Amino acid sequence: MNKMMNKDKRAQEEMVGFVIIVLFVIIIGVVFLGFSLRQKSTSIQHQDAQMLDIMQAMLAFSSCDSQVSDLIRDCYKRPDKECNNVKVCEYLEELFSDILEKTQGKEIADAFIQGYQLNISNSETLIYIEKGNLTGNYFSNVYPMAAGGSDLFFNLKFYYSR
């Protein structure tokens, strides 16, 4: 009888040990899940902030004795105005293409960013540029600009596949 109680007691101890191990594994899993979710949200916030920085830098760039934001307004209000002997809208398209080409690289196929799309519009499109693979996941930002009674929207999207 005493042997039987020792066997039952040993079985109970093994079950308690097993439960402790399972609880320990669950706690580690919950902590790991919490960290992995927190890192993803920070990454999205970082991408959003980075996108806005790129857009503001583009708009603050000076060319033709004006800031690019003023040239965009000129493109909307006075599309026949010239900048460096080229119509202002065409000049801006070349300028934005050059900036995106230099910041995102010529070979974007092997990079994290696999394509981009820039669109400046109100009810109609003023400037539109695209390059690379425009399918899959993307992050974007829209920067509104006042342009004499109408709002212009500067929209930039970066496409990625990972």
Image: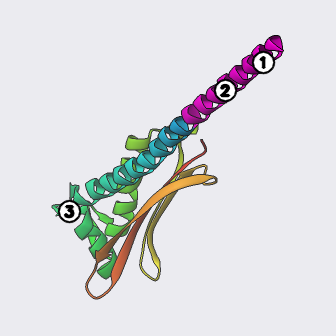
Viewer-side residue, 38 vs 115 = 38
Q: Is residue 137 magenta?
A: no
Secondary structure of the residue carrying tag 1 is helix
Q: Position of residue 155 (x, y in %)?
A: 43, 65
Distance from disc 3 to disc 2, alpha carbons, whole Å, reads 72 Å
Q: Is residue 46 above or below residue 129?
A: above
The amino acid type of the residue labelled 3 equals: Gln
Amino acid type indicated by mark 1: Met
Query: Disc 3 marks which residue?
Result: 67
Q: Amino acid at mark 2?
A: Val
Give residue 5's mark: 1
Image quadrant in which you'd find residue 43: top left
Assess whether residue 16 is covered by the magenta stretch.
yes
Q: Visible in this render: residue 110?
A: no
Check disc 3 and report its element: helix, strand or loop: strand
Q: Which residue is mark 2?
A: 16
Give the mark, 1 or 2, whose residue is nearer the N terminus: 1
Residue 127 falls left or right of residue 135: left
Residue span colored magenta: 1-29
Using residue 119 as the reference point, say whether residue 21 is left or right of it: right
